């Protein structure tokens, strides 16, 4: 959720990248905001992933050129089936906060990003997927 931290990492990364797994995630019980005023779950679970993947796109393209493809994997959840993304109120500034709804929105955003990133980046050999980690024994 820290834009400056993600930006520093992106600037420092100088190698081709073949696989990026975006797995950072939080669930909050109440409303929390980043320094920028963003709702904490959406910022952590999606916006940080978005900034990292888009910032590393050139490195992913270089990795794809080396090995015939690169992948971005967003660890999402079946929670995406519970809510769409309200682009008019991403950060719960106009309605009562619902932590489960906020989480579901962030996971829907992961899925939408994967679809759109693949559409936009396929020409560079980059494919993005959103996955549900499922049960683990």
Image (spheres, grey):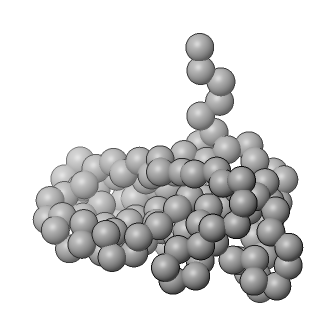
Position of residue 35 in the picture relative to residue 131 (left or right):
left
Image quarter of residue 51: bottom left
Q: Residue at x 75, y 83 (%)?
A: 93
Classify 121 as above or below 21.
below
Task: Judge by depth and name the residue closer to the eye, 44 or 69.
Answer: 44
Viewer-proximal residue, 71 or 123? 71
Which residue does the image show at 19% across and 53% down from the upper left? 66
Q: Is residue 9 left or right of residue 74?
A: left
Residue 21, compared with residue 15, is above or below; it is above
Say above or below: 81 vs 86.
Answer: above
Q: Can residue 116 be spotted in the picture?
A: no
Please tell me how many numbered marks the rendered image carries: 0
Q: Quadrant of residue 78?
A: top right
| Observer able to see residue 81 | yes
Residue 45 in the image: state x and y as whole percent. 56, 58
Q: Nearer the viewer, residue 6 or 15?
A: 6
Position of 127 compared to 20: left or right? right
**Quarter of the C terminus within the rendering:** top right
Compare residues 99 and 65 and report the one nearer the observer. Answer: 99
Please provide percent x and percent y for residue 16.
19, 58
Classify residue 37 as left or right of residue 4. right
Tell me which residue sits at (53%, 74%) in the image. 34
- Residue 50 percent location from the top left of the image: 48, 68
Q: In the displayed orientation, state which residue is furthest to the top.
A: 137
Residue at (41% x, 47% y) in the render = 21
């Amino acid at each position: 959720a820290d834009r400056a931290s993600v930006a520093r990492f992106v600037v420092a990364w100088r190698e081709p990248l073949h696989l990026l797994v975006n797995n950072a995630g939080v669930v909050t019980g109440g409303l929390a905001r980043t320094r920028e005023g963003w709702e904490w779950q959406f910022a952590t679970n999606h916006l940080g992933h978005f900034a990292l993947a888009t910032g590393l796109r050139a490195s992913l393209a270089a990795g794809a050129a080396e090995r015939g493809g690169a992948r971005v994997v967003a660890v999402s959840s079946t929670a995406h089936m519970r809510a769409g993304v309200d682009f008019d109120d991403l950060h719960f500034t106009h309605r009562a906060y619902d932590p489960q709804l906020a989480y579901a929105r962030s996971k829907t955003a992961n899925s939408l990003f994967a679809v759109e990133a693949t559409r936009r980046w396929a020409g560079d050999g980059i494919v993005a997927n959103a996955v549900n980690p499922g049960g683990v024994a």
